[in-house]
Image (cartoon, rainbow, N blue to C red):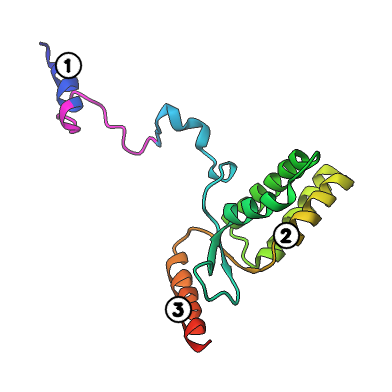
Amino acid sequence: MDANTQAHVAFFLTGRRPSEHLDAVDGLGLRPALFAGYRELTELRYDFPLVLVLGRADSLFAQSLSGLIDDALGTVAQGSDGERIRKHVLRLEQEIRALATGGAVGSFSALWDKAAGGLAKAKGADKSFEDSLRRTRAAIKFDGEVADCDAALPSRLLQHAWAAVQKRKAD
């Protein structure tokens, strides 16, 4: 077995790069080919950002944005126009997620309005889009601060949880 093949086998088995036979790939910014489509995470539906619900002392004091949207769509997106509503609201959810990832802070309703305004300008004055958002927003009965997954999230979440526990004790 030649030295080059031996170096490849050693790397495969141990994960360590033998001396000079393999070039270093550190710092090249490479990612597996299967993940190439997921370079921009805001295009995916995942559990962040969180909405730190104001005034809740139960286990729902913090909810994921996708969970809120799913609950609202479960009640609103019914019947013949259900798919239209679902499509419009999921596009709005993606825009809210992009705003939060971009550093926008504020309440859920403020980010909802900002995202809806931006999408309404981009889409033009589409009455069905406005109807979808109005009906879905009416189904969401609470508001709270939007918190993205960043370095400040643990302390914000812990403070919010502490306040919820203290409220429950006081009640």
**Residue 102 visible (yes or no):** no
Task: Residue at 80% x, 38% y: name it.
Answer: 80
Which amino acid does the dot numbered 3 rest on? Answer: Trp
User: Which numbered disc, 3 or 1, marks the residue that appears first in the sequence?
Assistant: 1
Q: Is residue 66 above or below residue 2?
A: below
Task: Residue at 20% x, 32% y: name it.
Answer: 15
Which amino acid does the dot numbered 1 rest on? Answer: Asn
Q: Nearer the viewer, residue 134 or 112?
A: 134
> Which numbered marker is on residue 162?
3
Circle 3 residues within 10 Å: few <14, some 14–19, many ≥20: few
Which residue is labeled 1 in the image? 4
Which residue is labeled 2 in the image? 139
Residue that lies at the very extreme toward the bottom in this rendered image: 170
Q: Secondary structure at mark 3?
A: helix
Which amino acid does the dot numbered 2 rest on? Answer: Ala
The mark closer to the camera, 3 or 1, is: 3
Residue 59 place in picture, x, y as percent: 49, 68
Q: Which residues are magenta?
A: 13-28
Judge left or right: residue 49 versus residue 74: left
